[in-house]
Amino acid sequence: MSKFKKDGGKPAPAINTSSLPDIVFMLLFFFMVATTTKEIDPLVKVIPAQGVGVTDLTPFKQRSTVDFVYLGEPLAGDASKFDKGVAVQYDGLLHPDGINYIGRWKTAKFNEKPAEMTDPKENIITCFKADEKVPMGIIFTARDILRDLDFNSIAYSAAEMGNKNAYSIREQ
Amino acid sequence: MAKRVVPEINAGSMADIAFLLLIFFLVTTTMDKDTAYLRKIPKKVESLVTPPPVEEKNIYKIVINSKQVIQARDSIIKPEDISTLNSRIKHFYLINRGKKTDRALNYPYYAYGSKELYSTNLNNQFNRLDALEAQEVQDDRTQKMIEQTTAAIDKWQQKLNMMNLYTQYSGKQEMPEIAFEAHIRLESFVDTDYSAYVAVQSEVQRAVTELRDEESEALFGVSWTTMNRYIQTNALEDTPELRQYKKHAELIETLYPLSLIEVKPKR
């Protein structure tokens, strides 16, 4: 009285897979349109700060007039080796000088571009992608260095808050 | 001639190829957008003369301490109430707007420009330039004064253009301008968290954006945010629409300037 017959009957018809490439291509195109290329692999842990009314940096990225500096706890290694436990990442490099290296980094980046492609110095944005716990003193040190070198545009990175109504601020 | 039979290409591996591409894109790209608040660092000015102090009423001072508690003017704001900053800043901008008498004393006053005023100023500067150029002895000092006058002419001409644009769209003969010294002064401590600092930046940005959007909707029927986004994505093109938007956005930004001074922490 078994319900499940093991043999006999018709063999299952083959599933028609001729439209499978179409479906996969559709997915592929969706991802190509909806995503942007990753710049670099992060070496520091960054939980973004929240904010409303932020500016999208994509147009600036397309014109390559924005440089990102990442600040936060290092993902690997000892955090106490760095000043105040905050490592600073420049293009895939955690520099031991921390924030004081920013001047040399910006100048080198500016000089290595061909002269006809560069924007004026003050239009190149330096974007600080800092973890929410990073103390502001570090960023103000960077501001001073950048001001002395005439890189006058900066940006404070923040994630769009969306419909949530509360900022995530650490209480003490 | 016998017709050649074109053999059918086997498309069975097409799906595999597409999957390969798909996975490649999944790995190398990210979904999250980079968003940020754009700010300018003021240029270094080397002058020995200390500028006269700004009147207290023109400053909206916000201090964030190392425990993320905020002081805005005389009120203490706890971190969870930070979203009240928005309405406080709007109040700072709006309380004296449109008033000529009976103004709140502790808030920035407004100036009211008119076509006549700007035209008179412009003509005065033109006369001054003529007088300077007609001088017989031209030395360094006259050169400097001519430069100054040309700059002033540019400034008044720009103001007159804005005034005309404002009158054209609003029908009003007077343009309210907040005192040019009025600003928000943001002070922090060395140990202030980045998130708290950005939250205050966000509130300032939100207040100014909402004021601008309201004004822009009333004048042009398009919000300032929309115009700004258009300008930024199409910055490299030169279309009549872009030029118009740029002019409109400039007017709105003059009516509601975002002047934010970020002070270097001392402790």
Image (cartoon, rainbow, N blue to C red):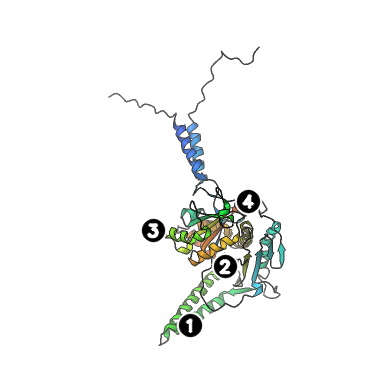
| Mark 1 lies on residue | B128
Mark 3 is on which residue type?
A: Pro
Where does the N terminus of chain B fall, quadrant-wise?
A: top left
Would you place residue A108 above or below residue B61 in this image?
A: above
> How far apart are the two marked residues, 2 and 1, measured between alpha carbons?
27 Å
> How far apart are the two marked residues, 3 and 2, measured between alpha carbons?
36 Å
Q: Are marks 4 and 2 on the same chain?
A: no
Q: Which mark is residue B141?
A: none
Whole-percent x and y of residue A160? 60, 52
> How far apart are the two marked residues, 1 and 3, measured between alpha carbons?
45 Å
**Which type of secondary structure does the marked residue at label 4 adopt?**
loop
> How far apart are the two marked residues, 1 and 4, measured between alpha carbons?
55 Å
| Mark 4 lies on residue | A162
Residues marked 4 and 2 touching at CB (< 8 Å)? no
Work out which residue is located at the far left of the displayed protein and give it: B1
Q: Are marks 3 and 2 on the same chain?
A: no
- Specify the subunit that label 3 lies on: A
Mark 4 is on which residue type?
A: Gly
Where does the C terminus of chain B fall, quadrant-wise?
A: bottom right
**Which type of secondary structure does the marked residue at label 3 adopt?**
loop
| Among numbered discs 4 and 3, the one appearing first in the sequence | 3
Work out which residue is located at the far bottom of the displayed protein and give it: B136
Work out which residue is located at the far top of the displayed protein and give it: A1
- Specify the subunit that label 1 lies on: B
Residues marked 1 and 4 touching at CB (< 8 Å)? no
Whole-percent x and y of residue B105? 70, 74
Residues marked 2 and 1 touching at CB (< 8 Å)? no
Q: Which mark is residue B254?
A: 2
Q: Which mark is residue A114?
A: 3
Say which of marks 1 and 4 sits in front. Answer: 4
